[in-house]
Image: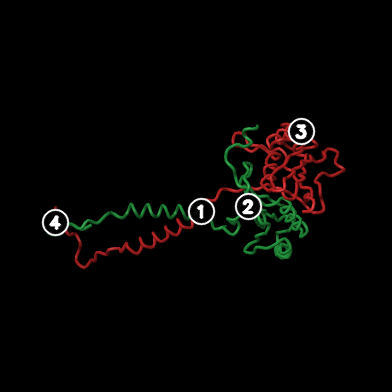
Chain colours: A green, B red
Amino acid sequence: MRFGRKGGAGFAEGDMTPMIDMTFQLIAFFMVLVNFSEADQNQRIRLPSSELAKPPDGPVQSPITLQLTDKGTIIFGPDETTLAGLRPLLARERTVIDNTPGRSTAEATVIIRADRNAQTGRVQEVIGVCQDVGFEKFALRAKQEEAGLQGGRT
Amino acid sequence: MRVRNVQRHGEENIELQMTPMIDIVFQLLVFFIMTFKIVSPEGDFNIRMPKDAPSEARPSDPLMLPPIQVRLAANSDGTLAGITMGGRTLKTFGALHLAIREIVGDDRGPGSIAESTEVEFDCDYQLKFEYVIQAITAVSGYVRDNRIIKVIEKIKFKPPRRAPGG
């Protein structure tokens, strides 16, 4: 800050420090909350909700995420495929898992993010294809629901 | 007020240019605000379904009960038409939950009925998946005092029933 300007025509310099502090706080907030796992959470999928669906305590072992749209197509990574197209993709995934030390297909978890309006039979068909390829562990994903639907009935 | 110039001779007063930094900081802020999405937490219902073992209950194990059959029938548009458990018609998933708890009781832990009991869902092909999740929620537990109390964790599915001509 400068003092002693002539003629009373003061050049008012605001103090920038609080603003910069706040801005950095905001950036830190958004950086912490930013979601980089967007590939595994396609926004087209509207998950069913359940109050028992709590986030897992630890990391899921060798997760493979399959997303089933309400139209019956399957999103696997960047690919959107049909049931017939899923089998070779899963077989390739199995080869990768089997060739990785310390990982096995039987212990890999297939996470199924199915749309709430998807047909149950379609979900079962997807599970069937996974079973054919050799996967055994499945996780049906749901959105966490607040308040007791069931709390009222206990 | 007179400010005494304490700057010594030969020493330069370096003024930090704040403008570029603030520019970048605001760019970052706008980027994060634009890409920010509120994602609700997600959880899993874990199911172990090996291909060659349709039932986890081993026939040689006398303690294993036969699986509880829950039938979920659907209308042609995929909405729920009815819930049946062992020939008993249930109107809501709340009723299904109570019926399951009648069977397994409040006994929990290793060797309990809840641990050894298995539920087998028999669903129509076109049934909307959200009803299956509601049914799984009804049989697998409940929340009391913000804690999840597990009821039945072993869940499996019968092959889906296709509608005639479907």
Q: Pointer 2 indicates a residue of which chain?
A: A
Q: Secondary structure at mark 4?
A: helix
Q: Secondary structure at mark 1?
A: loop
Q: Pointer 4 indicates a residue of which chain?
A: A
Q: Which residue is mark 1?
A: B37
Q: Which residue is mark 4?
A: A8
In whole angstroms, how far apart are the C-alphas of marks 4 and 1?
A: 50 Å
Query: Does label 3 or label 1 sit earlier along the sequence?
Result: 1
Q: Which kind of residue does numbered mark 4 sit on?
A: Gly
In whole angstroms, how far apart are the C-alphas of marks 3 and 1?
A: 43 Å
Mark 4 burial class by Cα count in 10 Å: few <14, some 14-19, many 20+: few
Residue B112 sits above or below residue A110 on the image: above
Mark 4 or 1: in front is 1
Mark 1 burial class by Cα count in 10 Å: few <14, some 14-19, many 20+: few
In whole angstroms, how far apart are the C-alphas of marks 1 and 2?
A: 22 Å
In whole angstroms, how far apart are the C-alphas of marks 4 and 3?
A: 89 Å
Q: Looking at the image, which residue is at 38% across and 54% down?
A: A23
Q: Pointer 3 indicates a residue of which chain?
A: B
Q: Which residue is mark 2?
A: A59
Q: Pointer 1 indicates a residue of which chain?
A: B
Apparent side of residue A70 relative to residue B88 in the rendered image (left or right)? left
Q: Which kind of residue does numbered mark 3 sit on?
A: Ile
Q: Which residue is mark 3?
A: B103
